[in-house]
């Protein structure tokens, strides 16, 4: 926090609090001391913790108790109660408890000034007071006259602000607070790279290097585990640190006054002073130019593969409901709904398999699709999973590749993208809702049994184009103006009025567009009837230089053919080739017909000439 304020006050006069402030600033004892020092700001570059420090003085002679209470209510971070070591008084401490809410109390520091006047310490008298009032962080004896412990006093004040005990530990119960346990548990699970429930030596060293930039020596590792073993029976298992042992160590750090160790760990894993993941951690800055898309890069795919393998405990290449629940223990909420299992590849039991991990793989800058295709949600999910920690990146923005402008791809007639979007359009009941989920495990009969609120509006399928792995996101959205890479126009071969809708959509939105279109003859297992339209589907495609209608059905005991997805992806990758191929085929068709006619006429003329002779 760059706006820390430290408030020095006392309910008793002549204890030397103003002298302390002036001795700190001038590094010498003042000959004349005013009733109250002006507010002082110490720059960040001269403080041990590199944060600006605001010091506010209080004078009983100039200010009333009500003004004192007002100052206390303004202070957000720390109060230094100064007392003279002769005599030690504590009747002013309850003021803070009477005027502040229990959950919003600020940390306190007791400062025993004028230690130069006595030869003994007042700590024996102060310790019972500290035990009585749990808000007191520490006690420091000092002397403004001899400059004893002056710098140390304000160092402890900064430490109490930057590494407070309050959010972490409950002194009355002598245990970690629930919010702290929750945060440290997530950190443990992220650091448990093999998900076996213990941190082995390699994982502990990686954790140590991640948080403190230095590994632990082998003997130091053994010493840590021995400390845990001596204090609890289930803190170490299989020579690794369990979650209980991990939490015990942090409890021990706090009880021994090493709060900064726990806070260093928490902040390295993205937590703020309220033990919430910061917005900067979850949503790092990512600039996306217009008409560009974003994709997870290769390193991100490898990371997600490792996350899948880590939670696939039975090694069946699928995540059971229990394994999915275990995966999302590092999330503050359940990010998947019941529609996810109808969006990606699943096994026979409907469990997500290794090729179907549906973390966002493609994001449009216009964000017209669902939240699963939102780049900010992608960054958030990767943050919960600890991508930047495990992959040792500055942030999870390193997992995102921003593709170049699509217009440049068209100009260069090549693309480096891996993910493409397809909009599936058709009259209601034509089968357009079956085309996107036409994946193994999502057959037509199964689609009929899916509850309406469990259906997905999009599906992700993997295809291979010229040996390259590509991803096609199909959506049955009826927003026909959404920017996509390829369009499916679906009609029902068994419904005589179905094709009319597809034809009207094409003529209204895509006839002058450069977006490739494919006509799908859905439910091709049924009897094909004549369409009530001026042109048959084949004639319509021929007239508008489209590929002939592609037959497709999900009503089969076998997985639907993925040829259609490969064709769609290929057309999305090479829209210029799709059009050129059609034009070339039309040209050669016309040329061949013309050559045939010319040959027939020539032969007829030749025979007529022979007869004349």
Image (cartoon, rainbow, N blue to C red):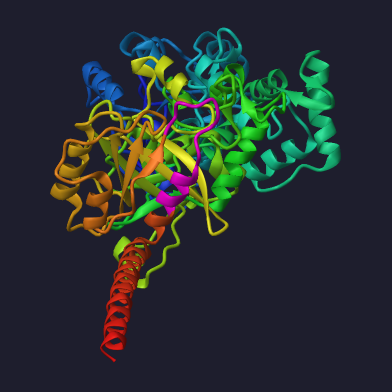
Give the number of callouts.
Answer: 0
Q: 113 and 81: which one is in front? A: 81
In the rendered structure, the answer to whether residue 361 lies left or right of residue 604 reads right
Which residue is at a point 33% across and 46% down the rendered structure image? 549
Q: State the image quarter where residue 523 is shown.
A: top left
Q: Nearer the viewer, residue 361 or 212?
A: 361
Is residue 425 shown in magenta?
A: no
* Placement of 581 over or under 167, stated as above or below: below
Residue 506 point in image, percent of width and height: 19, 47
Which image quarter: residue 60? top left
In the rendered image, is residue 509 in sight?
Answer: yes
Q: Of residues 398 and 239, which is closer to you in this image? A: 398
Left or right, 328 with reference to 422? right
State whether residue 470 is above or below residue 308: below
Pick out the residue farthest to the bottom: 613
Looking at the rendered image, the quarter that the C terminus falls into is bottom left
Q: Which residues are magenta?
A: 553-569
Give percent across and percent down for residue 486.
33, 50
Q: Is residue 541 above or below residue 38?
A: below
User: x and y percent of residue 447 in the render?
Assistant: 42, 21
The residue positioned 36% from the left and 61% from the top of the image is 578
Tell me the quarter of the image containing the N terminus: top left
Asked whether 564 falls inside the magenta stretch, the response is yes
At a point 81% along the width and 13% down the height, the residue shown is: 233
Q: Position of residue 328 (x, y in %)?
A: 53, 24
Asked whether the viewer can see residue 49, the reply is: no
């Amino acid at each position: 926090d760059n706006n820390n304020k430290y408030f020095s006050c006392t309910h008793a006069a002549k204890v030397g609090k103003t002298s302390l402030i002036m001795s700190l600033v001038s590094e010498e004892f003042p000959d004349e001391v005013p009733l109250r020092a002006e507010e002082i700001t110490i720059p960040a570059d001269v403080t041990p913790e590199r944060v600006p420090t605001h010091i506010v003085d209080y004078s009983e002679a100039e200010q009333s108790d009500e003004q004192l209470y007002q100052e206390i209510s303004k202070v957000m971070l720390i109060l230094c109660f100064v007392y003279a070591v002769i005599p030690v008084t504590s009747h002013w401490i309850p003021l803070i408890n009477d005027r502040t809410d229990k959950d919003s109390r600020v940390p306190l520091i007791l400062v025993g000034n004028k230690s130069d006047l006595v030869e003994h310490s007042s700590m024996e008298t102060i310790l019972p007071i500290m035990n009585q009032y749990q808000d007191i962080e520490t006690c420091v004896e000092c002397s403004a006259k001899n400059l004893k412990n002056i710098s140390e006093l304000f160092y402890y004040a900064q430490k109490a602000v930057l590494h407070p005990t309050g959010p972490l530990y409950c002194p009355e119960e002598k245990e970690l607070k629930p919010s702290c346990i929750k945060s440290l548990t997530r950190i443990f699970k992220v650091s448990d790279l093999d998900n076996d429930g213990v941190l082995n030596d390699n994982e502990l060293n990686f954790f140590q290097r991640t948080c403190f930039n230095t590994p632990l020596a082998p003997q130091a590792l053994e010493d840590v585990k021995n400390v845990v073993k001596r204090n609890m029976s289930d803190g170490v298992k299989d020579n690794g640190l369990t979650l209980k042992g991990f939490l015990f160590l942090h409890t021990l750090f706090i009880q021994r006054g090493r709060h900064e160790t726990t806070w260093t760990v928490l902040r390295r894993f993205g937590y703020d002073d309220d033990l919430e993941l910061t917005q900067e951690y979850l949503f790092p800055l990512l600039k996306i130019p217009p008409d560009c898309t974003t994709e997870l890069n290769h390193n991100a795919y490898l990371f997600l593969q490792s996350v899948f393998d880590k939670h696939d405990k039975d090694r069946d290449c699928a995540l059971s409901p229990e394994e999915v629940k275990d995966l999302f223990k590092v999330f503050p909420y359940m990010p998947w709904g019941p529609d996810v299992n109808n969006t990606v590849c699943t096994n026979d039991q409907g469990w997500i398999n290794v090729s179907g991990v549906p973390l966002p793989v493609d994001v449009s800058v216009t964000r017209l699709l669902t939240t699963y295709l939102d780049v900010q949600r992608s960054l958030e999910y990767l943050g919960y999973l600890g991508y930047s920690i495990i992959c040792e990146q500055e942030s999870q923005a390193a997992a995102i590749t921003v593709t170049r402008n699509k217009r440049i791809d068209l100009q260069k007639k090549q693309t480096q993208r891996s993910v493409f979007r397809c909009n599936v359009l058709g009259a209601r009941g034509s089968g357009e809702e079956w085309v996107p989920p036409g994946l193994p495990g999502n057959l037509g009969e199964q689609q009929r049994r899916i509850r309406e609120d469990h259906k997905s509006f999009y599906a992700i399928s993997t295809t291979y184009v010229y040996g390259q792995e590509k991803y096609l996101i199909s959506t049955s959205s009826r927003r026909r103006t959404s920017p996509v890479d390829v369009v499916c126009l679906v009609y029902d071969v068994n419904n005589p009025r179905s094709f009319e809708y597809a034809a009207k959509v094409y003529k209204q939105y895509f006839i002058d567009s450069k977006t490739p279109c494919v006509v799908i003859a859905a439910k091709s297992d049924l009897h094909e009837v004549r369409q009530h339209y001026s042109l048959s589907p084949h004639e319509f495609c021929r007239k508008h230089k489209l590929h002939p209608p592609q037959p497709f059905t999900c009503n089969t005991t076998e997985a639907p053919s993925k040829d259609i997805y490969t064709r769609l992806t290929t057309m999305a990758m090479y829209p210029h080739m799709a059009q050129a191929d059609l034009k070339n085929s039309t040209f050669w068709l016309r040329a061949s017909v013309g050559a045939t006619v010319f040959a027939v006429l020539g032969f007829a003329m030749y025979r007529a000439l022979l007869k004349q002779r």
